[in-house]
């Protein structure tokens, strides 16, 4: 009888796709996945006259679903008014980076567990969280096991010794697996960016810093084109490309990892006179992305680039990293959008544990780090950002491997000795948005929480005519919120649990 009860309990757990919790520290919970089981969102068909409310909490709930009915009453709490008639930017989607470290961590797991991990990101709701973007490096980064480029033999300006490395074979294989997982493989957008040119093309002969020698401007453009050629031969097409990762890093001699310095003028000149014509002559027409650096450089970095009208016409988007966001007003995003309303803005790198800004490496099961992810996503999408891309998809327990010991955290941590991986609170922070806000959704107006530091929200209208409200409560106590739809006489009374991520879903224009 006991054995039957145990079997029934396991069967119910599998059927409900709930998180298999593991306590990894005081108030620190992860969800464990392996080759046979991983939790996933339960998302039934949305019915007229009802709302769906999904909650994840510090005490262990993960995407817990409540279905309720509309009300004509307002509870004692905060009123949040949603107006789908006022639409702002289109949402492009969400994603993460496939670095060498990610590929090596995936390879440390069994084939079935690798599949579960990739499905957790790129599968549709019910399997994964609907990622549509992958950022890949052109050559090595700090998240490689060694410093390298694709051509480390000096002074071969013909680049006859250009070669991909073994890690590229792994990454290419995983990109093809991702496409097979996605419900629409053609929707995958791959963004490519180089951290540095081969060191013999640089003024310093050093992988960590220095600028590109002017005599190698065309050589380096040919190098980037050869990367495009190599990936195309393997069936991988690049959607977007940036001139350089974090172009100011390369001006610091004591920088800890791969970097090359670009002033805005130099980046603009090289792009318009070398990179773009070289790629286009080879038959490539990717989306060109400007800046790829921190918010504090907005809008001055792109202002200087875009003084050249050809450059302004060339670049379709502006890419931003999240480091230092807590110190820099998001109004810089508004200023940038108002100056360049024809340019989209993407967050293309975000991670916790980036020393010296905080304690480096992995903080397993940290809810605080999840809250920072959720707050940052809400903030950026509230200020004209079109999409949000995480850094490494999966790291090891140390936050690597990383040749420069620049260890950081990740939404998923692999535990190869057990053939497991852990979904951290940051994974669920992202999923509360990416699960429910597909590409071509529009950010819409929501008012009532603008002056609340601990309870913030952002709202969207999806192509399926669903209203989505994403909210976070960072308080130690629950908070009552009434959501009022400005286009209908209906209200939704919600209780946001203490320290919670929340997503509300209902049909528009009922």
Image (tube, grey):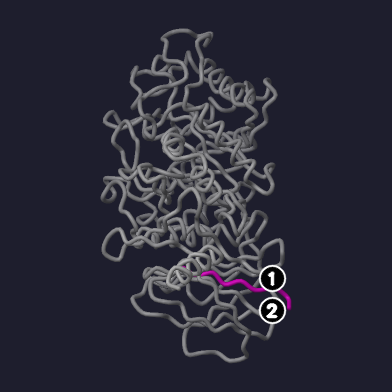
Q: Residue at x 53, y 38 (%)?
A: 290
Is 322 in front, or is 422?
422
Give the x, y percent position of residue 332. 47, 54
Give left or right: position of 330 versus 49: left
Q: CA distance from mark 1 to mark 2?
A: 8 Å
| Residue 287 included in the magenta stretch of the image | no
Q: Residue at x 68, y 72 (%)?
A: 46
Res. 487 mark:
2
- Provide the major secondary structure of the magenta segment: strand
Res. 85 mark:
1
Mark 1 or 2, nearer chain start: 1
| Figure quadrant of the C terminus | bottom right
> Magenta segment range?
501-510
Give left or right: position of 430 versus 59: right
Q: Quadrant of residue 372?
A: bottom left
Vertical relation: 163 (above or below) 419: above
Q: Residue at x 52, y 32 (%)?
A: 171
Give the x, y percent position of residue 319. 52, 43
- Marks 1/2 in contact by CB < 8 Å: the verdict is yes
Badge 2 crowding class, 10 Å Cα cut-off, few under 14, some 14 to 19, many 20 or more, is some
Viewer can see residue 265: no
């Amino acid at each position: 009888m006991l054995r039957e009860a145990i079997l029934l309990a396991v069967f119910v757990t599998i059927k409900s796709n709930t998180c298999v919790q593991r306590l990894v520290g005081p108030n620190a919970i992860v969800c464990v996945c392996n080759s046979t089981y991983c939790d996933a969102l339960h998302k039934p068909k949305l019915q007229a006259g009802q709302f769906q409310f999904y909650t994840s909490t510090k005490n262990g709930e993960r995407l817990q679903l409540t279905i309720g009915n509309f009300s004509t009453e307002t509870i004692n709490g905060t009123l949040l008014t949603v107006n789908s008639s006022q639409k702002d930017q289109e949402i492009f989607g969400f994603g993460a980076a496939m670095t060498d470290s990610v590929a090596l961590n995936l390879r440390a797991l069994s084939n079935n567990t690798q599949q579960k991990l990739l499905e957790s990101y790129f599968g549709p709701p019910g399997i994964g969280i609907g990622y549509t973007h992958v950022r890949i490096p052109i050559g090595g980064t700090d998240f490689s096991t060694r410093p390298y480029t694709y051509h480390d033999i000096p002074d071969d300006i013909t680049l006859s010794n250009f070669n991909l490395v073994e890690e590229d074979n792994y990454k290419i294989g995983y990109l093809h697996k991702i496409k097979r997982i996605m419900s629409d493989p053609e929707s995958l957008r791959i963004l490519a960016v180089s951290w540095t040119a081969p060191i013999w093309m640089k003024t310093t002969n050093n992988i960590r810093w220095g600028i590109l020698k002017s005599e190698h401007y065309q050589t380096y453009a040919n190098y980037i084109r050869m990367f495009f050629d190599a990936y195309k031969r393997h069936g991988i097409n690049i959607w977007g490309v940036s001139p350089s990762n974090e172009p100011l890093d390369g001006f610091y001699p004591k920088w800890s990892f791969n970097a090359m310095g670009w002033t805005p003028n130099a980046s603009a000149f090289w792009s318009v006179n070398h990179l773009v014509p070289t790629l286009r002559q080879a038959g490539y027409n990717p989306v060109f992305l400007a800046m790829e650096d921190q918010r504090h450089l907005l809008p001055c970095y792109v202002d200087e680039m875009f003084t050249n009208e050809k450059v302004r016409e060339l670049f379709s988007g502006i890419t931003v990293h999240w480091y230092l966001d807590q110190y820099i007003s998001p109004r810089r995003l508004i200023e940038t959008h108002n100056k360049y309303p024809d340019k989209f803005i993407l967050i293309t790198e975000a991670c916790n544990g980036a020393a010296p800004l905080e304690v480096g490496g992995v903080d397993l099961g940290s809810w605080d780090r999840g809250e920072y992810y959720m707050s940052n996503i809400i903030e950026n999408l509230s200020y004209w950002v079109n999409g949000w891309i995480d850094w490494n998809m999966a790291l090891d327990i140390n936050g690597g491997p990383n040749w420069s010991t620049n260890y950081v955290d990740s939404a998923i941590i692999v535990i190869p000795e057990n053939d497991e991986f852990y979904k951290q609170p940051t994974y669920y922070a992202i999923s509360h948005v990416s699960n429910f806000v597909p590409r071509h959704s529009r950010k819409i107006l929501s008012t009532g929480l603008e002056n609340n530091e601990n309870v913030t929200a952002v709202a969207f209208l999806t192509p399926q005519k669903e209203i989505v409200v994403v909210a976070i409560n960072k308080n130690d106590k629950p908070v009552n919120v009434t959501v009022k739809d400005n286009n209908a006489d209906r209200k939704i009374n919600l209780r946001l649990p203490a320290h919670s991520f929340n997503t509300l879903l209902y049909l528009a224009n009922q």
